[in-house]
Amino acid sequence: MAVSGFEGFEKRLELHFFGDDFQLGLRKIDFESIQLVLEQVQCTVVSAVGNAYFDAYVLSESSLFVYPTKIIIKTCGTTQLLKSIRPLIFYSRLIGLTLCSCRYTRGTFIFPKSQPFPHTSFKDEVTYLEDTIPSNLCFRKASIMPSMSSSHSWHVFTATIDHHDQDNELFTMEVCMTDLDPILARKFFRRPDDGKTGHSAGKEMTELTGINDINADALVCDFAFDPCGYSMNGMDGDWYSTIHVTPEDGFSYASFECVGSVNANNIGHVLRKVVQIFRPGTMSVSTTCSGYSNEMWKQMATAVEPLGFKCRSCAMDQFPAAATVVFQTFTPRRKST
C-alpha cells in the first residue's frame, strides 16, 4: 500500500427539496452559480449533458446530478464536499425551494490523514452537518456500519423532516472496489502524447472496457484524465449511473453507482458486468431503499457468487423517516477475510 496517493473513495451528498416548481426547479440554477458552489468544494466541471429529466455533470473529481427537486454530488480526492450545502440552500431559496432531506455517505478513506476539514473524521463531518442543515430536519441519525475488515466501513448520516415523501419503488446501489486486477486497470491509462481529448479518450475507454454494455440504453458522458483515470455518467430516462476509476497500482479503486426499481430483476446482471470489468480484490456494496424493507442484498450475493466472490459480511441499519441501508463486503473465495 502506498504511503500517500490519490484518494479514490468518494464522499456522496444527496439533498431533496420541496416547493411549487416541480418542472424545472433546481435545474434553473445557472451554470455560473453551479461553478461557485463547486469552487467551495474544490472541483470543476469537465463535461455535461442533460435530458428531459435531469442534468449530469462529470467533475474533475467525480459527478454532479441536478434534478428539479434533488441534487446528488459525489466527489473524491481531497475535496470539501460538505461545504456545498450552504450555497446550495441559498440558491434553492432564490427559486422558491426548501431543503427537506439530506443524506451523506462514504466508505473508509485510503488516506484519511490527507483529508481537509470537515472531512478529518466522521465525527467532524457529523458535527459540521448538524451545524449546517436547518433545524426543521429534525429526524437525524449518524451511523458507522461495520464489516469483517476494519478498513471497510460505511458511514451514513441522514436528516429529514417528518413528512418527506419518498419513492418506495426506487433503490440506490453504491459499489466500491479496491485492489483492481492490474491488467484490467491498465485500460484506464492513456498512452503518452496520444493526441486525444479527454472526451475522445474517454469514449475509447468506455468501449474498450465494456462499460458501454452495462446499460446499452443509457446515454453516456465519459472523460479520460491524463495520464490516467476515468469518469462517466449514464442517463437512462430519469435514472442515472456513474463510474469513477483511480487505476494506479498500490491504491487502485473504482466505484459504480446507479438508481433503479426494486421491482426490476436486472440489478444482479448489472453488478456482474461491473465486477467483470474490474475484478477487484475487495468490494463493498451498499443498497439504500426507502421505507423499512430492503431485500436487495440477497440479489447482490447471488449475482457475484458465480464469479467466485463470497459475501464476507452484511450489516443493516434503519434511518428514521429516511431509508434502510444494507452494507455488504465481498472478496474472491481464494482470499481469506
Image: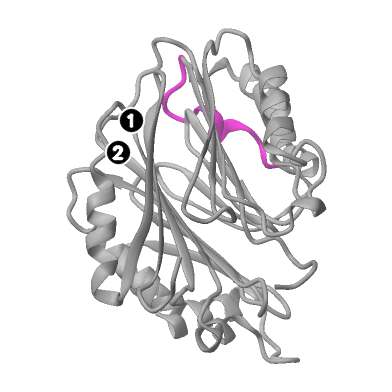
Where residue 154 sits: x, y (%)?
A: 52, 44
Where residue 281 sits: x, y (%)?
A: 48, 73
Which image quarter is the N terminus in? Answer: bottom right
Find residue 170 and name its label. Answer: 2
Residue 232 seen in render: no
Q: Is residue 169 left or right of residue 117?
A: left
Q: Quick check: is 278 in the magenta stretch?
A: no
Q: In this view, does 267 lie to the left or right of 61?
A: left
What residue type is disc 1 on?
A: Ser
Q: By what rule are the colours in the image chosen?
A: one colour
Residue behind mark 1: 290
**Residue drawn at (39%, 18%) of the image:** 321
Q: How crowded is mark 1: few (under 14 residues within 10 Å), some or many (20 or more)?
A: many
**Residue drawn at (38%, 29%) of the image:** 323
Say whether marks 2 and 1 touch (CB < 8 Å): yes
Comparing labels 2 and 1, the label whose residue is closer to the camera: 1
User: In the structure shown, which secondary structural element does the residue marked by tag 1 occupy?
Assistant: loop
Between discs 2 and 1, the one toward the N terminus: 2
Where residue 270 sits: x, y (%)?
A: 30, 64
What residue type is disc 2 on?
A: Leu
**Residue drawn at (66%, 53%) of the image:** 109
Q: What stretch is highlighted in magenta?
A: 20-31
Where residue 112 sits: x, y (%)?
A: 74, 52
Q: Quick check: is 27 in the magenta stretch?
A: yes
Q: How crowded is mark 2: few (under 14 residues within 10 Å), some or many (20 or more)?
A: some
Of 312 and 297, the residue lying toward us = 312
Find residue 147 and name its label. Answer: none
Q: Is residue 296 left or right of residue 2?
A: left
Which image quarter is the C terminus in? Answer: bottom left
View extreme (front): residue: 336
Look at the picture and state if 75 lies above or below 88.
below
